Amino acid sequence: RTLHNRFLDGTIVNSKSGLTFLTVNGFNKDKLKYIGNFIEISSPSAIRVTSKECVTILSVGRFELVKDYLTAIKSVAQVTKKFDEKKIEYLIIGYGPLEEEIRDFIEESKISSIKILIDPPNLSRYYQISDIYLQTSLYEGTSNSILEAMNASLPVVATNVGDNGFLIENKKTGFLVSSRNVEGVTEYLTELIKSETMRVKMGHAGKQRLCEFFDRGKTLNTWLDYLNNLSREKNLG
């Protein structure tokens, strides 16, 4: 904070929640600049259409407490009981210290359609074959996995933490729920599983939002404008 307030010309923050945190904690807000993460966007105009009988739910992230996979597994287990088990598939992709604990959660759920994949080399393929993205984190900054899900035109069900409330337009590109809210996650997953039309509509809206706020070219231009302005202010340009 002392370095920022007294010596630096500015500080770049890549999450809106981080910007709020720093401002509240005494960082000079006039020297803070939000520039978000960007992503290489594939086929911006493509509308996702699926015709699978099985709906695939996907989660991607390290196996740590902050990701709260217990809530995700409990929710999917409840959802699966509402449908034929063959209709629901849940893929958890990642790696980390809680792998065995997560495997135990899955075994206790007695749902055979919940599967773990450890750090596969072709991650993008799993976004493409999935229908819904699920994230139940207790904390996030700007979630790259949600950006990847939006890039694949997936509707997202996620906890309203960190920048998730900015990434996801609630009830338009997906659904936001409170942390550890098994009932809320179950409800929204159920809605999406029942309606392919809703999944396609929300996924397309998410892709449009991605193009608007997280395009690589737009982000790079924001960086250049910011650096040029600083240069002019310091009489270096």
Image: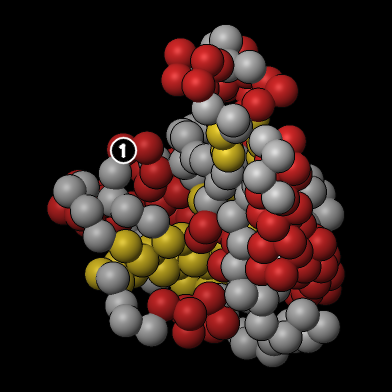
Residue at 41%, 68% in the rendered image: 91
Above/below status of 70 relative to 61: above
Outermost bottom residue: 51
> Label 1's element?
helix
* Foreground pick, 227 / 97: 227
- The amino acid at mark 1 is Leu
In the figure, residue 184 lies in which quadrant? top right
- Residue 35 at what x, y percent from top left? 65, 47
* Foreground pick, 168 / 181: 168
Task: Classify residue 188 as left or right of residue 55.
Answer: right
How many numbered discs, if any?
1
Outermost top residue: 26
Residue at 81%, 62% in the rendered image: 212
Residue 121 in view? yes
Task: Classify residue 53 as left or right of residue 123.
Answer: right
* Foreground pick, 177 / 5: 5
- Residue 190 at what x, y percent from top left? 66, 57
Above/below status of 104 relative to 23: below
Residue with the mark numbered 1 = 65
Residue 85 in view? no
- Residue 162 at what x, y percent from top left? 57, 35
- Residue 201 at what x, y percent from top left? 83, 69
